[in-house]
Image (cartoon, helix red, strand yellow):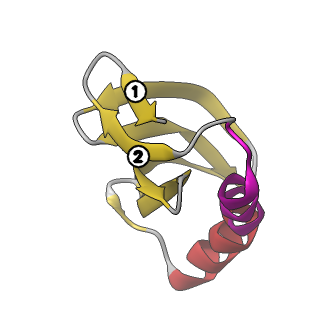
């Protein structure tokens, strides 16, 4: 999906990305937000929410996005960070990953 004017910010507990999505002759504001959790020693995206012009995306588009993000989530679950992740915290200024 072609997305332009991309911005990313940190909100407490969430990473929020936004931009303009070109759908044929129609441009829409898109926003993707997600949290991060420590699961089995890995950092896993959680609570993925996608809004199109401020509303939840239609089921057809959600299916396409889910198909695109599934490999990324799967890869994150197999990544080797060199340590066991115990917790992840997102503040307005940083992402803190703690482990041993």
Measuring from the top left, give residue 10's x and y in whole percent.
Answer: 35, 28
Magenta segment range?
70-81
Secondary structure beneath disc 1? strand
Q: Secondary structure at mark 2?
A: strand
Residue furthest top in the image: 93
Q: Is residue 78 above or below residue 63?
A: above
The correct choice, above or below, for 51 with respect to 58 in the image is above
Q: Residues within 10 Å of mark 2 (few under 14, many from 20)?
A: some
Q: Main secondary structure of the magenta part?
A: helix
Residue shown at 40%/38% (left/top)?
15
One can see residue 40 in this view: yes
User: Residue 30, which numbered label?
Assistant: none
The residue that label 1 is drawn on is 95
Left or right side of 27 for 32: left
Relative to 90, residue 67 above or below: below
Residue 26 placed where, x, y %? 62, 53
72 in magenta:
yes
Q: Are marks 2 and 1 in contact (CB under 8 Å)?
A: no
Which residue is pictured at 68% across the width and 53% down the height? 76
| Residue with the mark numbered 2 | 86
Q: Which badge, 2 or 1, comes first in the chain's sequence?
A: 2
Which residue is outermost to the bottom? 59
The percent position of residue 19, horizontal first and vertical second, equals 53, 36
Q: Residue at x 36, y 19 (%)?
A: 94
Disc 2 and disc 1: Cα gap in Å?
Answer: 14 Å
Comparing 71 with 81, the one in front is 81
């Amino acid at each position: 999906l072609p997305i332009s004017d991309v911005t990313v910010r940190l909100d407490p507990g969430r990473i929020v990305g936004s931009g303009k999505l070109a759908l044929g002759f129609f441009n829409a504001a898109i926003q993707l937000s997600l949290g991060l959790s420590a699961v089995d020693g890995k950092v896993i995206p959680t609570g993925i929410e996608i809004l199109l012009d401020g509303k939840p995306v239609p089921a057809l588009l959600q299916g396409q996005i889910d198909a695109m993000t599934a490999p990324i989530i799967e890869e994150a679950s197999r990544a080797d960070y060199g340590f066991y992740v115990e917790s992840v915290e997102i503040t307005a200024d940083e992402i803190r990953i703690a482990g041993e």
